[in-house]
Image (tube, grey):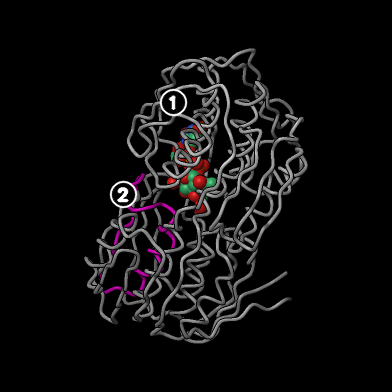
Amino acid sequence: MEHIVIAGKRGLRGEVNINGAKNAAVAIIPAAVASASVCVIDNLPHIEDIVSLVDAMTKLGCKCRFINRNTLEIDSTGVTSVTADFDSIKKLRASYYLVGALLGRFGEAQVLLPGGCNFGTRPIDQHMKGFEALGAAVAIDHGMIKAKAAKLTGAHIYLDVASVGATINIMIASVYAEGTTVIENAAKEPHVVDCANFLNILGARVKGAGTDTIRIKGVTELHGGEYTIIPDQIECGTFMLTAAATAGEITVRNIIPKHMDSVSAKLSEMGCKLTEGSDFITVRGSDSLRAVNVKTMAYPGFPTDLQPQMTTLLCSANGTSIITETVFDNRYQYITELRRLGCQVTVDGRIAVIEGHNRLTGASVTATDLRAGAALVIGGLCAEGVTDIGNVKYIDRGYERIELNMQRLGADIKRVSE
Ligand code: EPZ
């Protein structure tokens, strides 16, 4: 088991090149299976979720080759199986995109129910509703998602929830569906747009991604292509919040500033100084930041995936802050670990009340999920003394070598094996 050990030190400063977006990559890689062709995907973060996906796709018959650490070639011409019952499927949530890709291409898919971070119920009813609307019979049987259709026909689908996963999965499944598929109340996250752009590079006809109505005109075949993943909005936000929390000055580079608007606005409201260019943002924190209230929302609102990191930052702000988590019903399990660092946070359902002015002190803590792990890294950087973070595997699912990036910013942080 590996741990990350941090000697708290404020005032991190320097530059970070942001990697490709995990949640775009884990959608686009399985989407490549929908086309019996060769795709090359660039600017991939080298993280555990991608390694797990590549393992599953290889076992399905794809030929996957890392041209370099961040570029993957996928030859899916040899895929013959529609059954993905490998352990790697259970290591991440995004493995369920293989259902949409296999169902779209072969009219059938049998994929183990996915894994992923545990913060409350994470149903897939909207995915299943979309597949059924396209003409598939869908069931969960012996822990497998089973979908089968003699023919997929375009349908008008109104999502009950603007689900990122359901929007992307239905979009992938419908690329060959005869006629037009309309997804209403679609998610608008940047990674939804990125996956739509990738499918269009392959010859699909997806319009409206990034709005709440996406239209997909069925095509008879897709070809190969090359695609570069967008920068990771959440990794970027994690380093922006790190600058604020440690009263440092960090420039995040290779980003799309527009994707960060809700985060930049909140940090400015707290009293940080931000400078924005075409592909970078510099965040200058301070030791005297204002408490603010935050409500997590679907894009373009404040991202739920930055909620734990924001909670940690608000522990050092002047005054009392309130966070409302509107996306997931139980995304505060990490608070128990934050309290070990001295954070004063009370939770009531989806509301967290954070007493600021906290003087954090180092402790032994355990990551409960991916973004909670990132929050504990920020907490350790702010704390006096040494913080030891266990369950680093969670952090590695979504951040490529987080400790190396933090070291470059002046942090006293290292990865140790138990
Ligand atoms: C994606 O999860 C991301 N994961 C999550 O990021 C992110 O937190 C989430 O979107 C919200 O932005 C990936 O993209 C791999 P949803 P997803 O479907 O698709 C409910 C990270 O740290 N819902 O948009 O699972 C659901 O319970 C991860 O990178 C249904 O009710 O999220 C939740 O309350 C963590 N029925 C809400 O919708 C469904 O069929 C939003 O979930 C699907 C979802």
Counting the numbered discs, the total is 2
Q: What amino acid type should be assigned to the residue bearing mark 2?
A: Gly
Q: Quadrant of the C terminus?
A: bottom right
Element class at badge 1: strand
**What residue is shown at x 57% (from left), y 31% (from top)?**
222
**Some atom of ligand 1 lies within 8 Å of the CB belonging to the residue at label 1:** no
Q: Which residue is mark 1?
A: 216
Q: Which mark is residue 234?
A: none
Residue drawn at x 41%, y 65% as measured from the top left: 254
**Which of the two discs, 1 and 2, labels the residue nearer the N terminus?**
1
Mark 2 sits near ligand 1, with its Cβ under 8 Å away: no
Rendered location of residue 274, percent (x, y): 26, 71
| Residue holding disc 2 | 301
Which quarter of the picture shows residue 83?
top right
Instruction: Name the residue type under label 1.
Output: Ile
Magenta residues, as a range? Answer: 297-323
